[in-house]
Image: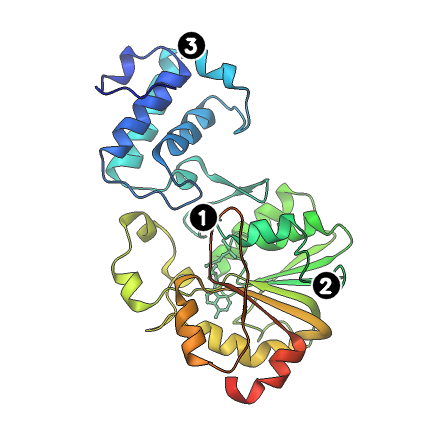
Amino acid sequence: MQKKSESHSLSLITTVGDAIQWGADHFEGADLYFGHGFDNAWDEAANLVLYVLSLAWDSDSDVLYRELTEKEKVKISHLYDRRIKEQIPSAYLVGEAWFAGLKFLVDSRVLVPRSPIAELIENQFTPWLPQAPKTILDLCAGSGCIGIACAHYFPEAQITLSDISTDALAVAKQNISLHQISNRVESFESDLFAGLGGKIYDLIVSNPPYVDAEDLASMPKEYHHEPEIGLASGIDGLDFTRRLLTEAVQHLSETGVLIVEVGNSCSALDDTFPNVPFLWLEFERGGHGVFMLTADQLSEYRQEFL
Ligand SMILES: C[S@@+](CC[C@H](N)C(=O)[O-])C[C@H]1O[C@@H](n2cnc3c(N)ncnc32)[C@H](O)[C@@H]1O
């Protein structure tokens, strides 16, 4: 689609494609940050327009030529206004986000799902697991996106979602219902492992809070709409991960695997534990700062973590 150079009122616009382009132009000029599921202005505008029209993200491109009604234009204009003036991520404006090809309900009680771990789940963590896990823990589950996506890609597995936030767990429970998997997915309120009893897992996967103090202080306004408890993790971003590394081995089966996202705090982690062979996973769709350790390795380096 041709990019327009001059902007004009949304009321003068006729088609879906023009409305998306109009929104993208305005978003680009408004100093917005795109890091919550979409990495560019056009996709964010498209997300809002398709939501108003109740159309799926993978709709046929013919939809770009569909004419908008006045009512639809008013709704789109309202969402564009909020995205620009309040700098709310579009996922919160529409109340949903996509992760590993699945829809999740989201609001400001949970982070917007965006972890690169989605790519690992879609590939069933190949080649990193010794066998398909029978039990999986999504530690720091937030919306439940990681654990519920695991339930989808490992249809035989039993899944536990845990989070310290009652608010986040309420959203996770909505997503368990949405995906109709309450027979295989349970949720617990727990500070790290404290509320999980002695349960053992074949796979623990976690996207915990890992933002360091410097990054936290300079985050774009969009991040301030997310719960700080899901982001902040001390001066070097590793307060949570240090605890996790000490305790995880007690909750993993003998051939168990731990996969954790620490984002930009990856160098700090390598510097803190220079002898530990963190395996930093790579992603075709982008993303970084996700490591893997086996139960054996956690056991071998236990003294270092303590
Ligand atoms: C980065 S968010 C990740 C949410 C979700 N897994 C995702 O990928 O979108 C981190 C989550 O960790 C939770 N959390 C923070 N401190 C915790 C703790 N001590 N124990 C358990 N969960 C914690 C927060 O409530 C938040 O939901």
Q: Is residue 217 something that shows in the picture?
A: yes
Q: Residues within 10 Å of mark 3 (few under 14, many from 20)?
A: some
Q: Residue 212: x, y in percent?
A: 34, 67
Q: Is residue 75 something that shows in the picture?
A: no
Give the camera-side residue of 304 and 146. 304
- With 25 as the anchor, is 274 left or right in this view? right
Q: Secondary structure at mark 3?
A: loop
Q: Which residue is mark 1?
A: 112
Q: Ligand 1 closer than 8 Å to the CB at disc 3?
A: no
Disc nearer the start of the sequence (3/2):
3
Q: Ligand 1 closer than 8 Å to the CB at disc 1?
A: yes
Q: Residue 293: x, y in percent?
A: 60, 72
Q: Secondary structure at mark 2?
A: strand
Please tell me the numbered disc located at residue 2: none
Disc nearer the start of the sequence (3/1):
3
Q: Which residue is mark 2?
A: 135
- With 267 as the anchor, is 194 left or right in this view? right
Q: Residues within 10 Å of mark 2 (few under 14, many from 20)?
A: many
Q: Residue 164: x, y in percent?
A: 50, 66
Image point (57%, 79%), residue name: 247
Q: What is the quadrant of the N terminus in the image?
A: top left
Whole-number angstrom distance, CA of label 3 to CA of label 1: 31 Å
Whole-number angstrom distance, CA of label 3 to CA of label 2: 49 Å
